[in-house]
Amino acid sequence: MNFTKETPVMVKNFHYDINEKPEVKDQVNFGLKKVEKQNDDGTTDPGDGGSYFDVTVIFDVAPAPGEFSVSGMISQIVKLEDYFGDGSDLEKTDYKLLSRPLVEYIETLTYEVTQITLDEPVNLNFQANF
């Protein structure tokens, strides 16, 4: 599947907490919603050549040993080339391809924040589970 990035990755929110009690959780949800693209002149792009989608990852993660948690929502608008469906019939590999840039942001943000707060960076290394 070919796609073009219509927007940069958008960190809608990112939250970091030190857990009072150790807690381990791994909730990462992927969403794909068909959207219309508005042109600069106020018209709606007809979607010639493919459909536009809002790709979103919502997460609430506390990696073992559970000393901290990160949560938030990250998204990006993409155009799926030569695809005109609603997204429900895509292959698992397509979902992984679309979500990977967003997951990398979560991994990078967590690495950087833990480098500062814990004096030791934490690599999450998420694996998609579709």
Image (tube, rainbow, N blue to C red):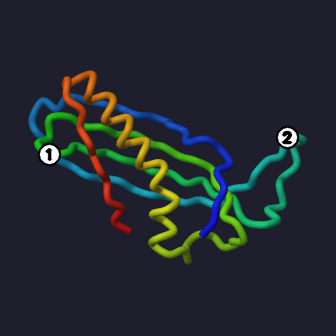
The Cα atoms of the two marked residues, 2 and 1, are separated by 47 Å
Q: Secondary structure at mark 1?
A: loop
Judge whether 19 appears above or below 60 on screen: above
Tell me the quadrant of the picture where the C terminus can be found: bottom left
Residue 119 image position (x, y, % from top left): 20, 23
- Count all numbered tags in the image, as a single digit: 2
Q: Secondary structure at mark 2?
A: loop
Mark 2, residues whose alpha carbon is within 10 Å: few (<14), some, or many (≥20)?
Answer: few
Which residue matches tag 2? Answer: 40
Which residue matches tag 1? Answer: 64
Residue 49 image position (x, y, % from top left): 78, 66
Residue 8 image position (x, y, % from top left): 60, 41
At a point 66% along the width and 73% down the height, the residue shown is: 85
Q: Is residue 73 left or right of residue 77?
A: left
Mark 1, residues whose alpha carbon is within 10 Å: few (<14), some, or many (≥20)?
Answer: few
Judge whether 1 appears above or below 19 on screen: below
Tell me the quadrant of the picture where the N terminus can be found: bottom right
